[in-house]
Image: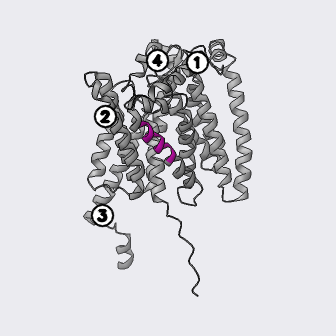
């Protein structure tokens, strides 16, 4: 009896163990809050900036370790921002240019920090961040839908040019932001973590908001990211039964999305704007002074300017922003920043594609993250992505996971 009584008594954890558990929980909590605040960008500094400082402080209490494998990303981003600071020198009296450069430095820090924290508890931390992002996506989506239909007079707050912008300043940023949680939910359905009905319910509101952004880039981003995720999840599936499940559910999901789109287009208010926005080219895209014409005309000029035009100075030469992150890198950050950005892009593509085909406990997470990040890298050809917070979140997580992956060991030679 005494043995049973002793066994039934609650076991007290040592004080240091209790502290460890609470500190781990605090880290998870701040990461969730960081993800949940990432969808609110109507004010500056945004809640994300404030929560990021809090998160850094919490993690700094136990120290942060920067893996040597993160040095290529960190050094290239540092070089990129050094180019930006040099390009800023003639425009130090221009507050928007100074603020633009400061934001670039801050975003570099977020990517390096997020990569560094993947050194421990990587899978749980990614899932915590994505859960927070999903909450933010729903809040931003609801705001965008309320604004689009001008419910309670919110149209002036949550729309821009009759397009849903939600808790973002620009519909072209809201749309791509929603792609991250949408791709994760879709992947969870394919691999059996969510049932089909639950997946449909979780994706419903963000998908409606994505449509109402009327952003061609965001639509293409979601379609391409989802397709790439499905393909990579299929190719890396461990069993034939999972591959069969992926094929079947993909067909069902595609059919449901087409049906939902047809229902949405039955509303005249939506259909009229959709018909205009669905065109591959708009009037402001084409012609010598259109978006693409301006990009081409800027290249010879930038080849003669080692420091570029300066931060946010492209529009002073061509009326509007470049809408191409690679041209903008040379225009706003000079040759140093431009080539550094190309280096970051090339290095990220190398580690990302290598990562998704490695058998690791985080392979499915890497597939979802890389599918969105790679498509966003491509989308940089038609929009400026260099100040998207979620781009740096994806960048940091991919590099952090790549740093965890064990290097390939060379085959040992047989003794002679």
- Mark 4 = which residue? 320
Above or below, 321 against 325 in this view is above
Looking at this view, is 301 or 342 the one in front?
301
Q: Which residues are magenta?
A: 337-346
Q: Residues within 10 Å of mark 1 (few under 14, many from 20)?
A: some
- Estimate the spatial distance between the alpha carbons at disc 2 and disc 4, rounded to whole Å: 22 Å
Mark 4: give few (<14), some (14-19) or many (20+) Cα within 10 Å: some
Chain-order first, disc 2 or disc 4: 2
Single out the mark in the foreground, 2 or 1: 2
- Residue at 64%, 18% in the rendered image: 274
In the rendered structure, which disc, 4 or 1, sits on the residue that comes first in sequence? 1
Res. 348 in view:
yes
Q: Measured from the top left, where is residue 390 in percent x and y?
A: 45, 37
**Pointer 3: what residue?**
17
Q: Position of residue 149 (x, y in %)?
A: 54, 15
The CA span between labels 4 and 1 is: 11 Å
User: To which residue does mark 2 refer?
Assistant: 85
Q: Which residue is mark 1?
A: 285
Rendered residue at 71%/53% (across/down): 243
**Label 2 crowding class (10 Å Cα cut-off): few <14, some 14-19, many 20+?**
many
How far apart marks 3 and 2 lie (CA) works out to: 46 Å
At 47% from the left and 54% from the top, the residue drawn is: 401
| Image quarter of residue 340 | top left
Q: Which mark sits nearer the N-terminus, 1 or 3?
A: 3
The C terminus: image quadrant: bottom right
């Amino acid at each position: 009896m005494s043995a049973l009584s002793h066994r039934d008594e609650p076991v007290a954890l040592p004080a240091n163990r209790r502290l460890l558990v609470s500190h781990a929980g605090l880290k998870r909590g701040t990461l969730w809050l960081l993800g949940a605040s990432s969808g609110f960008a109507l004010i500056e500094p945004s809640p994300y900036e404030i929560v990021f400082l809090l998160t850094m402080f919490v993690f700094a209490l136990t120290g942060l370790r920067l893996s040597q494998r993160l040095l290529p990303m960190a050094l290239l981003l540092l070089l990129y921002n050094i180019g930006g600071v040099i390009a800023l020198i003639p425009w130090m009296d221009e507050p928007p240019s100074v603020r633009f450069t400061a934001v670039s430095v801050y975003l570099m820090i977020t990517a390096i920090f997020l990569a560094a924290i993947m050194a421990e508890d990587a899978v749980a931390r990614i899932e915590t961040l994505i859960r927070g992002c999903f909450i933010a996506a729903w809040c931003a989506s609801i705001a965008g839908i309320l604004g689009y239909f001008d419910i309670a007079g919110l149209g002036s707050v949550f729309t821009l040019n009759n397009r849903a912008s939600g808790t973002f300043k620009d519909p072209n940023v809201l749309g791509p932001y929603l792609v991250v949680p949408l791709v994760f939910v879709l992947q969870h359905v394919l691999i059996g973590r969510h049932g089909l009905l639950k997946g449909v319910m979780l994706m419903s509101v963000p998908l409606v908001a994505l449509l109402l952004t009327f952003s061609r880039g965001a639509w293409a981003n979601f379609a391409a990211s989802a397709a790439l995720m499905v393909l990579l999840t299929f190719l890396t599936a461990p069993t034939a039964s999972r591959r069969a499940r992926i094929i079947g559910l993909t067909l069902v999901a595609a059919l449901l999305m087409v049906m939902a789109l047809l229902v949405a287009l039955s509303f005249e208010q939506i259909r009229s704007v959709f018909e205009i926005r669905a065109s591959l080219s708009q009037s402001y895209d084409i012609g010598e002074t259109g978006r693409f014409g301006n990009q081409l005309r800027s290249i010879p000029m930038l080849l003669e300017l080692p420091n570029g035009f300066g931060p946010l100075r492209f529009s002073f030469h061509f009326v509007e922003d470049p809408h191409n992150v690679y041209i903008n890198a040379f225009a706003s950050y000079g040759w140093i920043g431009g080539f550094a950005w190309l280096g970051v892009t090339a290095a990220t593509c190398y580690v990302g594609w290598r990562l998704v085909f490695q058998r690791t406990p985080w392979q499915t997470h890497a597939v979802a993250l890389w599918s969105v990040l790679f498509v966003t890298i491509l989308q940089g050809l038609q929009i400026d992505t260099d100040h998207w917070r979620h781009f740096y979140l994806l960048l940091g997580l991919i590099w952090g996971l790549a740093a965890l992956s064990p290097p390939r060991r060379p085959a040992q030679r047989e003794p002679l």
